[in-house]
Amino acid sequence: MSKHQFQTEVTQLLDLMIHSLYSNKEIFLRELISNSSDALDKLNYLTLTDDNYKNLEYKPKIDIAIDKGAKTLTLSDSGIGMNEEDLVENLGTIARSGTKSFVQNLSGDEKKDSSLIGQFGVGFYSAFMVANKIEVTSKKAGEDKAYTWSSEAGGDYEIVEATKDTHGTSIKLFLKDEEVEFLEYYRIESIIKKYSNHIPFGIWMDKEETIPAVTDDDGKETEPSKTEIKNIQVNKASALWRMNKSEIKKDEYKDFYKQISHDSTDPILWTHTKAEGTIEYNTLFYIPTTAPMDLFRMDYQPGVKLYVKRVFITDDEKELLPVYLRFVKGIIDAEDLPLNVSREILQQNIVLETIKKASVKKILSELKKLQTKDKEKYLEFYKTFGRVLKEGLYGDFENKEALLDLAMFKSSKREGLITLKEYKEAMKDEQKSIYYITGEEEAILRHSPLIEQFKAKDIEVLLLDEDVDSIIMPMVTEYDKTPIKPVNNSDIDEEIKEDKEEVKENEDKYQAILVKMKEILKDDAKDVKISSRLSDSPSVLIYDKNDPDFQMQQMLKQMGQDNLPTVKPILEINPKHEIFEKLLNKSDDLLLNDVSYLLMDQARLSEGMKIEDITGFAKRLNKIIAKAL
């Protein structure tokens, strides 16, 4: 016998299971059946592809046994099984770093937390919601020894050698006194049909049936009624994704989603495809309502399972769909792949690439239908997954137009989110481009000096306040043959500029000041120019059209590119502002020096940037205030 301590995160999770999550306790059975199904899938694959397992007797089956006297519920499978090392790894620790983060960030919201349990591979522990003790007896396929893992949900667990005739795993739950409802056949049957009806393996249980008494023609009883125990299959055990759509009810689609996703909420939509012809395959994809906890983690768990002719191959392959569709859950079942296909082959396989391309187009077209038919529901989807969807604009050039149609943006003129199509429909006749501004905070963007002239001319500007926007938008140069341009670019359209003659007059008028300011700010600014984009503010920062702006530079640094050369902005000044009118009448170089730095720092602040020399800024500001008084 060996005693082990639970990993800290497991102890935290167990405490939560036992004391906090009560509203949806029945999910424990869904999780245990799901684990058994995975074990059967793994062994099924090995018996078909690995010579060491091909002669192994394999009869896939899940059995559930009820013992009302002992108050135990036992779930057994004939899957791959576990040895002592596997039991420690799978039941004593949480391996995935994303899971550790999940445990640390549990909200305490019963519905939300319980729906996330299975997503992070910790569903086994949900059994402690109904059991005060659990025994797991397992024998790994191809090995001689069996082991029993047991725990009463304290800080430790035990593992002892055991006796087991066949490979597989048996989980015995010693139910709490208040959980005897889970010792009733019809209660267990209803849970299985709700969550596990389409597990591709039969789930069997003993059912007590009463056979009525036999009577003769005179009504005299010749045989008394009796009770028989029959072992029956409770679930359909059908691969739902291979069934005809006409045979499947909406509730069955929803229940199957909950089974494969471990999510208790209904999906927003699903799309079911059966392709016949040169390449044959079945796909069933779901768009969730809620985002998984690991959506923005590099080590996210993919949501799509790959089957070949109904044989499970993998649920850990990130190449089945593009990264920007990582929130999609579902099944790909291909007919024309070898069962022993390797990960390297998967990534280069023409058949799978064809299925992937068709699947992406199908998913995007279904989202477009949702956007058209039910904008409110689409907005719910977009607020949850829009940031991820936009990532596709960076690399998926084949579907760029479809993605641009689905993208939504905040606007300087309207509340809520709008599409590029809606932007174009509202464009003035003389407007030739779509304009946007990027930054970290919507409030700063709305009041940015960069869009003052746009507002004055009643030109709409898209407000892009997500970190991904600075990387993506430079890749998007047009939509529906209309150019898309950032407002902080030096190469701005003629449609927002002032009269050229007036600009030239102002350049001549302030020539001496411009020359001095360029010299004063030579370490901070690439150039100092007269602005035609300002109405109220005295200054603003812009960038040459080939230079990355501030947001892009910050994003590149976050991505580890710290050795990039410093890109200086251009300072533009407003010739109509009273500051410059007054500077014309003064020949005070010290004053101009202080004002130049203050205008530069003020422009930085307006764009959400930090001031490097805060002490110098404060001194100059105080000096100017003192003179004004």
Image (cartoon, rainbow, N blue to C red):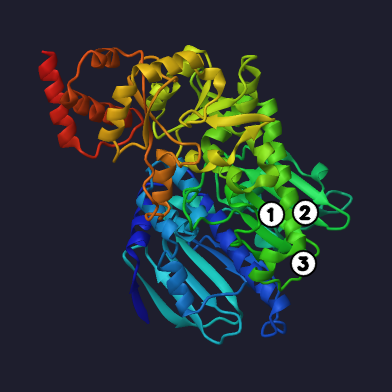
Tell me, for residue 337, which label it has, or none. 3
Asked if residue 560 is positioned above or below residue 342 in the image, the reply reads: above
Residue 2 percent across, percent down from the top left: 36, 80
Comes first in the chain, label 1 or label 2: 2
For the residues labelled 1 and 2, say whether their Cβ atoms are less than 8 Å apart. Answer: yes
Q: CA distance from mark 2 to mark 3?
A: 13 Å
The residue at the point 44 percent across, 42 percent down is 552
Query: Mark 2 belongs to which amino acid?
Result: Asn
The residue at the point 60 percent across, 39 percent down is 266
Q: Secondary structure at mark 2?
A: strand
Q: In this rendering, does residue 260 appear at all? A: yes
Badge 1 is on which residue? 331
Give the crowd class for mark 2: few <14, some 14-19, many >=20 residues within 10 Å. Answer: many
Q: Secondary structure at mark 3?
A: loop
Q: Secondary structure at mark 1?
A: strand
Q: Nearer the viewer, residue 73 or 246?
A: 246
Tell me, for residue 282, which label it has, or none. 2
Query: Mark 1 belongs to which amino acid?
Result: Ile
Residue 350 percent across, percent down from the top left: 76, 62
The residue at the point 29 percent across, 16 percent down is 580
Query: Mark 3 belongs to which amino acid?
Result: Leu
Q: CA distance from mark 1 to mark 2?
A: 8 Å
Tell me, for residue 305, which label it has, or none. none
Comes first in the chain, label 3 or label 1: 1
**Screen quadrant of the N terminus:** bottom left
Comes first in the chain, label 2 or label 3: 2
Would you say 238 lies left or right of 603 here?
Answer: right
